[in-house]
C-alpha cells in the first residue's frame, strides 16, 4: 500500500503529527516499536491539560483519539530501514515493506548511561535532565548537577536556574574538567557549592538517592541529581545519512522541519536539546502541516480521499 506519510516513532511528536495528518485526510502509517524513551518517568509535566499524566495514559489517550481517523494506521513494529527517493520511499516496517511519499522521523534520542553504579536504576526519577519536568516535586531539597566538559558553555546558566526551586545546589565536575575562575566566582557568589573531586558512589536508600559520596570520602546530601549524558541517534536515522549538527542532532529547516534528505522530515527530541513532551508535540504538528502543504502542491496529487 502507498501511504502519504510514514511516521517513525510513536512518542508525543509522532502522535501529534499523525493526528494533524489524519485530520487533513492523509494516509498515514505510524510505526512505534517501543520502548518509550521516558519509560522510567512516573509522570509528564508542563503539558497543559495533561500535567501529571502518566506517559502510558498519555499514549493510550492519543491512540484512542487517532482511532477516529480511518486514514491513520498505528502499528507496533520496528522500522528496519528506509530506501528510495522523495515520492517513492520504501519502508521496512516489521515483516512488511510499505511505500510512502514522505517520511517523518520522530524517533527521539538514545541516552547513554554514565558509568556510575546505580545511575541506570535511578535514571528518570532521582537522576533527571530537566528541572521544569521534575523540580516542583523535589523543591527545597538538596540538589546536584553533574556537569560535563561538553556542556561547559552553558553550565552556569543551567546551574544558576536551579536556585528557583531550591537554595541547596551543588555542582559536581567529577574531576573531568576545571571550571574557569570567573565561573567559579559567579556560582559561589550565588550560593552554589562546587565539588571537583571524582564521584565515588551514589548513596541510595530504598531506591531513593540520599547523597553523593566523593572519592575523598566526603558525602554531599543530594536527593535529585541533574545530568545530561551523551545521546545518539537510532540506527534508522543514522542509516538514512541525514545531516547532523555538532552535537549530533538532526539538522532541519526551522520552518518546514525538512532534513538534508529530500522528502524526509524530522520532529521532536532528535532535532534539539530542548527536549520536552510539549515541545516535541508542537514540532510534530508543525512538521505535519508542512508535509501536508508540500503534498498538496505536488502535481501528482489526485484529490481528497
Image (cartoon, rainbow, N blue to C red):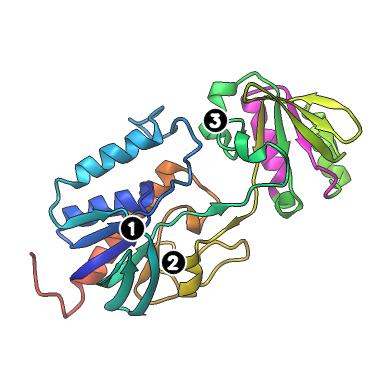
From the viewer's perspective, tell me whether residue 235 is left or right of residue 290.
right
97 to 287, vertically: above or below: below
Q: What is the magenta range? A: 154-176
Around disc 3, counting alpha carbons within 10 Å, would you say few (fewer than 14), some (14 to 19), or many (20 or more)? many
Residue at the far right in the pictured view: 216
Residue 257 in view of the camera? no
Label 3: state its secondary structure: helix
- Residue at which label 1 appears: 77
Frontmost of labels 3 and 1 is: 1
On residue 152, the disc is none
From the viewer's perspective, tell me whether residue 73 is left or right of residue 224.
left
Q: Where is the N terminus found, in terms of image quarters?
A: bottom left
Q: Which of pointers 1 and 2 lies earlier in the amino acid sequence?
A: 1
CA separation in Å, label 2 and label 3: 31 Å
From the viewer's perspective, tell me whether residue 274 is left or right of residue 144.
left
179 to 287, vertically: above or below: above
Q: In the image shown, does 167 or 173 lie closer to the viewer?
A: 173
Q: Where is the C terminus found, in terms of image quarters?
A: bottom left
Question: Does the residue at mark 1 contact the one at mark 2 (Cβ under 8 Å)?
Answer: no
Q: Percent from the top left, x then y, of residue 73?
A: 21, 56
Label 2: state its secondary structure: loop
Q: Residue 55 falls in which quadrant of the image?
A: top left
Task: Name the residue located 81 percent from the left edge and 30 percent from the top edge.
Answer: 213
Task: Name the residue located 22 percent from the left edge and 70 percent from the top edge.
Answer: 295
- Residue at which label 2 appears: 253
Q: Percent from the top left, x then y, of residue 197?
A: 87, 39
Task: Name the residue located 52 percent from the left edge and 48 percent from the top edge.
Answer: 274
Q: Percent from the top left, x then y, of residue 41?
A: 49, 35
Q: Percent from the top left, x then y, of residue 296?
A: 19, 70
CA separation in Å, label 3 and label 1: 31 Å
Around disc 2, counting alpha carbons within 10 Å, would you say few (fewer than 14), some (14 to 19), or many (20 or more)? few
On residue 134, the disc is 3
Amino acid at each position: 500500500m502507498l501511504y502519504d506519510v510514514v511516521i517513525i516513532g510513536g512518542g508525543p511528536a509522532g502522535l501529534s503529527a499523525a493526528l494533524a495528518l489524519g485530520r487533513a485526510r492523509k494516509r498515514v502509517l505510524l510505526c512505534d516499536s517501543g520502548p518509550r524513551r521516558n519509560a522510567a518517568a512516573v509522570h509528564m509535566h508542563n503539558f497543559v491539560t495533561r500535567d501529571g499524566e502518566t506517559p502510558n495514559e498519555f499514549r493510550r489517550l492519543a491512540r484512542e483519539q487517532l482511532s477516529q481517523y480511518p486514514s491513520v494506521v498505528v502499528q507496533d513494529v520496528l522500522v528496519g530501514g528506509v530506501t528510495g527517493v522523495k515520492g517513492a520511499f520504501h519502508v521496512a516496517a516489521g515483516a512488511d515493506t510499505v511505500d510512502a511519499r514522505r517520511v517523518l522521523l520522530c524517533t527521539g534520542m538514545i541516552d547513554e548511561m554514565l558509568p556510575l553504579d546505580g545511575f541506570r536504576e535511578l535514571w528518570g526519577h532521582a537522576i533527571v535532565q530537566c528541572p521544569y519536568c521534575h523540580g516542583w516535586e523535589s523543591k527545597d531539597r538538596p540538589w546536584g548537577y553533574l556537569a560535563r566538559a561538553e556542556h561547559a558553555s552553558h553550565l552556569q546558566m543551567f546551574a544558576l536556574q536551579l536556585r528557583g526551586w531550591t537554595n541547596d545546589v551543588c555542582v559536581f565536575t567529577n574531576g573531568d574538567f576545571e571550571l574557569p575562575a570567573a565561573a567559579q566566582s559567579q556560582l559561589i557568589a550565588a550560593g552554589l557549592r562546587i565539588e571537583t573531586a571524582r564521584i565515588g558512589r551514589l548513596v541510595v536508600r530504598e531506591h531513593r538517592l540520599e547523597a553523593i559520596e566523593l572519592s575523598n570520602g566526603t558525602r554531599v546530601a543530594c536527593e535529585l541529581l541533574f545530568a545530561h549524558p551523551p545521546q545518539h541517534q537510532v540506527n534508522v536515522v543514522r542509516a538514512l545519512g541525514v545531516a547532523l549538527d555538532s552535537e549530533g542532532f538532526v539538522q532541519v529547516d526551522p520552518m518546514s522541519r525538512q532534513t538534508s534528505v529530500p522528502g524526509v522530515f524530522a520532529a521532536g527530541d532528535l532535532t534539539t536539546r530542548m527536549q520536552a513532551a510539549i515541545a516535541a508535540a508542537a514540532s510534530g504538528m508543525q512538521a505535519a502541516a508542512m508535509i501536508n502543504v508540500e503534498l498538496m502542491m505536488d502535481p501528482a496529487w489526485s484529490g481528497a480521499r
